[in-house]
Image (cartoon, rainbow, N blue to C red):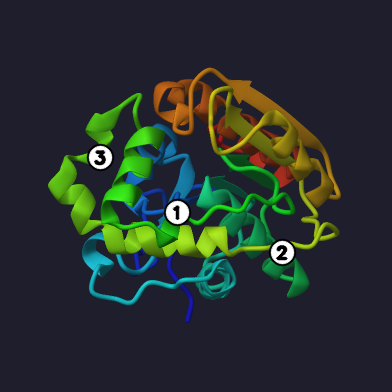
Amino acid sequence: MNIADNATTPWIRRYHQAAEARTRLVCFPHAGGSASYFHPVSARFAPDVDVVSLQYPGRQDRRREPCVDTITGLADLVTTELLALSAKPTVFFGHSMGAVLAFEVALRLADRGAPGPGALIASGRRGPSTHRDERIHERDDDGIIAEVKELNKQDLTVLGGDEILRMALPAIRNDYRAIETYTCAPGRRVPCPLTALIGADDPKVTAEEAENWREHTDDAFRLEVFPGGHFFLARHQGAVNGEIQRELRALATETPALLSGRDST
């Protein structure tokens, strides 16, 4: 079944209509995150860009659905959903766990010979074949809450208070389990340019670990380092949007049909 360019589904969220857009941006949320995190990004680029935000099971209006506790399982489901979208030049943007998920989905699309992203932006995550022995998903509730607050300490207001945070704990624990048990072979590469964005003070990724993304693309690679921690993009949204805009414009330049009509961004 095909998904119309103005439609939403349990997985696909469009906060601003952009049915006539010539390019698409697919946003992959972080662990415990939801599609609505990217509402400001949609507001920035629509209606010139079809901004699709993914909603994973187990959160917000899907909170009664079982979570998917492996990256591979989640990537399989997301791939099936994205294959139902119309073909448009597309940028994938994923933050933290979402960066790895975007990478895995891009690999699956390439394996199927299906149109994949023309560029992938991996934010706030070390390269896929790096490893840390992290077991935050095994902590008790208070331990996980402490971790989430530490990562968000520059702007605790985004968490919405302890009550909301505790309601989200099942999804947060699940997603930590998924990303902490994920492994990737060194030789797996996507056939598109890849840009890594990190915060200089992010405890979850060093510049050296982010450089590992270079080993996972057959195309160009760039690393950009911003001031701030794990959620540096909250304070540097304009600059991050600029990175997204750069990739969308590159797709338009590479696709002559997109040069007619108004600018895609």
In the image, residue 83 above or below residue 20 = below
Residue on which disc 1 sits: 136
Residue 60 x, y percent position in the rendering: 24, 60
Residue at x-position 72% and y-position 49%: 130
Name the quadrant containing residue 197: top right
Which of discs 3 and 2 lies nearer the camera? The answer is 3
Task: Say few, some or many: other residues with alpha carbon within 10 Å of mark 1 (under 14 / 14 to 19 / 20 or more).
Answer: some
Which residue is at 51% across, 75% downward? 77
Q: Residues within 10 Å of mark 2 (few under 14, many from 20)?
A: many
Q: Counting residues from the N terminus, which is met first, the one under dot 3 or under dot 1?
A: 1
Q: Nearer the viewer, residue 254 or 109?
A: 109
> 99 and 6: which one is in front?
99
Q: Amino acid at mark 2?
A: Leu
Q: Is residue 114 left or right of residue 81?
A: right
Q: Is residue 26 visible?
A: no
The quarter of the picture where residue 138 lies is bottom left
Residue at horizontal 48 percent and vertical 76 percent from the top? 2
Task: Provide residue 263's location: percent of width, then percent of height.
Answer: 56, 32
State yes or no: discs 1 and 2 in contact (Cβ < 8 Å): no
Q: Residue furthest left?
A: 163
Residue under label 3:
159
Amino acid at the residue labelled 3: Leu
Q: Position of residue 188 (x, y in %)?
A: 80, 60
Viewed as shown, does residue 188 lie left or right of 198? right
Secondary element under disc 3, as helix, strand or loop, is: helix
Q: Look at the numbered disc 2 and give the secondary structure of its residue.
A: helix
Q: CA distance from mark 3 to mark 2?
A: 32 Å
Q: In x, y percent, where is residue 135?
A: 50, 56
Q: CA distance from mark 3 to mark 1?
A: 18 Å
Please rate how many residues cluster around mark 3, counting C-alpha atoms within 10 Å: few if below 14, some from 14 to 19, many from 20: some
Residue position for label 2: 107
